[in-house]
């Protein structure tokens, strides 16, 4: 990645962004008194949601690289993390709408998206189309001034909370698979949209199966031209990847903070071997963090590049190593888990701001076609609790039941995402291997299943 | 060397029998039913393993209703139980309980307590710190005092309570495997002078009856739902001394080695299952119009899993043989087995999730059950790090001085 050139006009812009951010904080006053929606709404109205978006749409029309200047000030001033608040909305839908939606849609959707008043989901993956996203078979058929959609989606994170979703569907089964796709946004409350929660390995149901049966979508909710769905989806996925790979973090924050906290809190578990291992992990975390910072600075404008994939690749592996370390350090304490029950109230309410990190998984790419694939976003409902719960009192082990987030389980989300990031890096290289699928298996619109089981045959080999 | 990795016809048959038994009586739906049940296992199935198949006492002497075959045969069986995640007090009763009792000098206690365990009629649990890769006397949290009262311990004839208890126990032990439902608790306790001088204690090994007065057991929620743990508290609980110093600590040290090796066999069996499952999925799951196993990335993942499983198998069975026949330093063989197998199983489990994509992350798919078992196993009798530390002492430090 190139070093950005320093320039005076950018320095002026930076000053403006910083002043605006401070003004927002002044307007908010005590952050404890503002709701998440109020706080984020003020940021949006001031143009600090995405500084590179146009004025009036959450932006200031400035280079994207200046977002970091705003974020640093706002985050320090207590702003809830908009991405954690609505990961698919802020991470993926926002940039996609910015790139491909008309003014009317953007005016209507961007603000509640940013404030989290309207949650978003991503209806891409299907039982037969995961890594091979372009092989999807959900059909959209033209009907007067709109479209009628039938099909089945799966692994849809947060669909149970979403007001809106990004949808990729097949509009022309006769064209080669990547060319027959069109991109829509769909109202999740429209008739014919049925969401069925799927229980995850963590016990919670944060992803879902979504059946679409005769769902009507106005043509105004089409993003990009008919047949251009793949290109629009690339915007979504590239932004997803950059949202994952290079968020701004200070030293000793993020996953390594969990390990450092555990180390500080539990001198009784120290050993020379663990000490060296943690020092090594800390070093790797710093290299990762600083590379991410460099990528952010390099990206003053324009679309995200391969550097975001590098960040994701390293980050996913590092997270798993860090959580493995925590498990090893905890020893038998790590074999406990508070509960696999999914509290019903947790499903009813939107994931609160700051509820924890969202580890986001993606899977492998079609090496020929796209650098990365699909968003797995999972809110950790019990973030970092082990640090406090286990802190310094082994007696707390007896009762009440100790709690910790079973990092090993959670981290499988990132474990399973490594492949894709690697493919993402590979796909961005000049001489990429062009591996094309032999046949297009997805020309027929799939009828949704009607059975009532929670997970049924989803994802089984088709 | 020639016989190290060969299996007798009986052992081959044993593997086949247990696999068939598990397929029939412990299919995955049954494992899931049991993991949601209060007890966590089906005592009828457990006793069939003991009494009908006779596979719980393969390392126990014939004199005590065992088979006297040794640890290699027991490891073969445990690998199969691990493969199917068969629920039962394997850790408490067999891997720990029968091993401890088998090592006692006290013949009467062996004769009294072992037959029930290997028949699967009774169950045991061990409350002793083995989690640092060996028995750690400094981590004992229970103290024993000589009883001055002559009153009877509650008049029971079930295991552990027959002889007059001469001691009472105080303290609390966490992470007691299979501890909540065990009929017999084997407890390591520090026998103090009772004069306030805390240092001069020795370690004793005690038996406590499940219905002893002052015994409080609380199940703790576990990450691996197929395995139970309890916190066991002793409030002046009458106990019977099974072994005093120095025998108690020696038996517990040997038990830690045996447990390391037998747990390694479980890790191998379970990891092998995940490898088989993943290879099968890679063969049949189509993406881009081809089986995902035809993509090099997936192929390599499966190949890496295979390498891990095979290396794990080598050290696990080397360990069992070494403990049976003295072909290697048992401390080295045990720590080698645990450090390799813990890493292998956890890595294989993570890779299996990866191969399976989204479906591997669901509750319905078996991958998470094995993943949780993998991380739990790795923590039970010492982490890979702890065993490597022991290996460093044994191979590097001691080698320099000999
Ligand atoms: C927690 C979670 C949340 C998710 N959230 C969403 C969501 O909100 N919206 C959505 O649309 N999707 C979501 N997904 C789906 C995710 O994008 C898919 O799981 C992913 O695209 C992989 O598809 P698959 O599960 O069908 O696996 P498969 O495509 O069947 O892949 C199985 C394995 O094969 C490998 N593989 C496949 N093809 C190749 C190849 N050509 N080269 C090398 N390796 C290959 C994969 O890497 C993987 O290891 C989520 C998934 C998870 C686990």
Image (cartoon, rainbow, N blue to C red):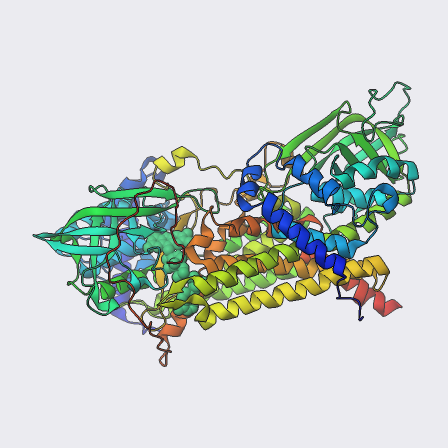
Tell me where residue A160 appears, x and y as whole percent.
32, 42
Tell me where residue B24 appears, x and y as whole percent.
59, 46
Q: Count up the numbered dots.
A: 0
Direction from residue B77 to residue B248 in the image, left or right: right
Q: Nearer the viewer, residue B224 or A347?
A: B224
Which image quarter: residue A434?
Answer: bottom left
Q: Residue at x 83, y 31 (%)?
A: B160
Q: Nearer the viewer, residue B187 or B184?
A: B184
Q: Quadrant of ligand 1?
A: bottom left
Q: Residue at x 21, y 68 (%)?
A: A179
Q: Is residue A72 visible?
A: no
Reply above or below: B15 against B151.
below
Tell me where residue A227 appears, x and y as whole percent.
18, 65
Direction from residue B57 to residue B164 in the image, left or right: right
Tell me where residue A404 appears, x and y as whole percent.
55, 43
Direction from residue B49 to residue A160 in the image, left or right: left
Pick the quarter of the image with the C terminus of chain A. Answer: bottom left
Residue at the farthest bottom position: A431
Residue at the farthest left position: A144
Q: Nearer the viewer, residue A218 or A137?
A: A137
Pick the quarter of the image with the N terminus of chain A. Answer: bottom left
Q: Is residue A165 visible?
A: yes
Direction from residue B324 to residue B357 in the image, left or right: left
């Amino acid at each position: 990645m190139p070093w950005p050139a320093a320039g005076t006009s950018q320095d002026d812009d930076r000053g403006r962004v910083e002043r605006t951010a401070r003004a927002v904080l002044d307007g908010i006053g005590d952050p404890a008194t503002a709701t998440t929606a109020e706080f984020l709404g003020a940021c949006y109205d001031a143009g600090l949601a995405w500084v590179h978006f146009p004025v009036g749409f959450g932006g200031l029309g400035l280079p994207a690289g200046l977002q970091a200047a705003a974020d640093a000030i706002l985050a320090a001033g207590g702003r809830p993390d908009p991405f954690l608040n609505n990961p698919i909305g802020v991470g993926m839908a926002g940039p996609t709408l910015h790139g491909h939606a008309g003014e009317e849609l953007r005016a209507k959707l961007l603000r509640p998206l940013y404030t989290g008043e309207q949650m978003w989901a991503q209806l891409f993956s299907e039982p037969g189309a995961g890594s091979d996203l372009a092989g999807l078979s959900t059909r959209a058929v033209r009907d007067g001034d709109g479209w009628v959609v039938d099909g089945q989606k799966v692994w849809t994170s947060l669909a149970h909370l979403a007001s809106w979703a990004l949808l990729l569907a097949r509009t022309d089964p006769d064209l080669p698979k990547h060319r027959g796709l069109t991109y829509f946004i769909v109202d999740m409350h429209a008739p014919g949209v049925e969401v069925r929660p799927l229980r995850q390995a963590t016990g919670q149901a944060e992803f879902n199966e979504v059946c679409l049966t005769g769902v009507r979508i106005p043509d105004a909710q089409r993003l990009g031209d008919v047949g251009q769905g793949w290109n629009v989806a690339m915007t979504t996925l590239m932004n997803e990847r950059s949202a994952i790979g290079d968020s701004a973090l200070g030293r000793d924050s993020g996953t390594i903070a969990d390990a450092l906290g555990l180390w500080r809190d539990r001198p009784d578990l120290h050993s020379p071997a663990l000490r060296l291992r943690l020092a090594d992990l800390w070093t790797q975390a710093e290299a990762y963090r600083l590379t991410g910072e460099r990528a952010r600075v390099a990206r003053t404008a324009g679309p995200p590049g391969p550097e975001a994939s590098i960040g994701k690749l390293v980050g996913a592996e590092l997270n798993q190593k860090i959580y493995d370390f925590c498990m090893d350090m905890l020893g038998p304490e790590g074999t406990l888990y508070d509960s696999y029950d999914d509290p019903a109230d947790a499903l009813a309410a939107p994931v609160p701001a700051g509820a924890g990190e969202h580890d986001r998984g993606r899977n492998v790419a079609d090496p020929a076609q796209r650098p990365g694939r699909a968003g797995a976003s999972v809110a950790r409902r019990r973030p970092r609790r082990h640090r406090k719960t286990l802190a310094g009192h082994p007696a707390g082990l007896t009762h009440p039941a100790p709690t910790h987030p079973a990092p090993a389980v959670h981290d499988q989300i990132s474990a399973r995402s490594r492949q894709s990031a690697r493919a993402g890096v590979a796909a961005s290289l000049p001489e990429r291997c062009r591996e094309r699928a032999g046949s297009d298996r997805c020309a027929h619109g799939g009828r949704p299943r009607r059975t009532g089981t929670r997970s049924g045959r989803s994802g089984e080999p088709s | 060397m020639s016989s190290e990795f060969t299996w007798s016809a009986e052992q081959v048959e044993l593997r086949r029998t247990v696999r068939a038994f598990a397929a029939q009586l412990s299919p995955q739906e049954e494992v899931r039913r049991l993991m949601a049940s209060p007890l966590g296992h089906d005592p009828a199935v457990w006793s069939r393993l003991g009494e009908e198949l006779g596979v719980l006492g393969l390392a126990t002497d014939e004199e005590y209703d065992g088979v006297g075959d040794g640890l290699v045969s027991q490891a073969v069986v445990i690998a199969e139980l691990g493969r199917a995640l068969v629920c039962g007090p394997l850790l408490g009763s067999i891997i720990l309980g029968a091993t401890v009792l088998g090592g006692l000098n006290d013949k009467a206690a062996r004769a009294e307590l072992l037959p029930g365990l290997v028949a699967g009629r009774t169950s045991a649990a061990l409350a002793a710190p083995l989690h640092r890769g060996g028995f750690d006397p400094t981590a004992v949290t229970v103290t024993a005092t000589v009883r001055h009262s002559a009153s009877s311990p509650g008049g029971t004839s079930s295991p552990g309570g027959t002889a007059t208890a001469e001691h009472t126990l105080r303290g609390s032990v966490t992470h007691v495997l299979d501890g909540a439902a065990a009929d017999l608790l084997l407890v390591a306790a520090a026998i103090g002078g009772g004069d306030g001088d805390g240092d001069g204690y020795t370690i004793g090994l005690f038996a406590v009856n499940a219905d002893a007065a002052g015994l409080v057991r609380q199940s703790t929620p576990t990450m691996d739902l197929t395995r139970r743990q309890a916190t066991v508290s002793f409030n002046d609980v009458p106990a019977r001394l099974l072994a005093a110093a120095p025998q108690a600590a020696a038996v517990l040290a040997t038990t830690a080695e045996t447990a390391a090796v037998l747990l390694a066999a479980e890790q191998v069996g379970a990891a092998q299952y995940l490898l088989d499952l993943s290879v099968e999925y890679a063969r049949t799951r189509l993406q881009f119009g081809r089986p995902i196993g035809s993509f090099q990335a997936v192929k390599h993942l499966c190949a890496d899993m295979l390498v891990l499983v095979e290396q794990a198998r080598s050290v696990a069975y080397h360990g069992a043989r070494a403990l049976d026949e003295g072909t290697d330093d048992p401390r080295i063989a045990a720590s080698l087995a645990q450090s390799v197998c813990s890493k292998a199983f956890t890595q294989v489990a993570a890779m299996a999730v990866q191969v399976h994509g989204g479906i591997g992350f669901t509750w319905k798919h078996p991958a998470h059950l094995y993943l949780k078992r993998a991380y739990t196993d790795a923590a039970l009798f010492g982490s890979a790090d702890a065993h490597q530390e022991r290996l460093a002492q044994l191979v590097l430090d001691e080698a320099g001085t000999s």
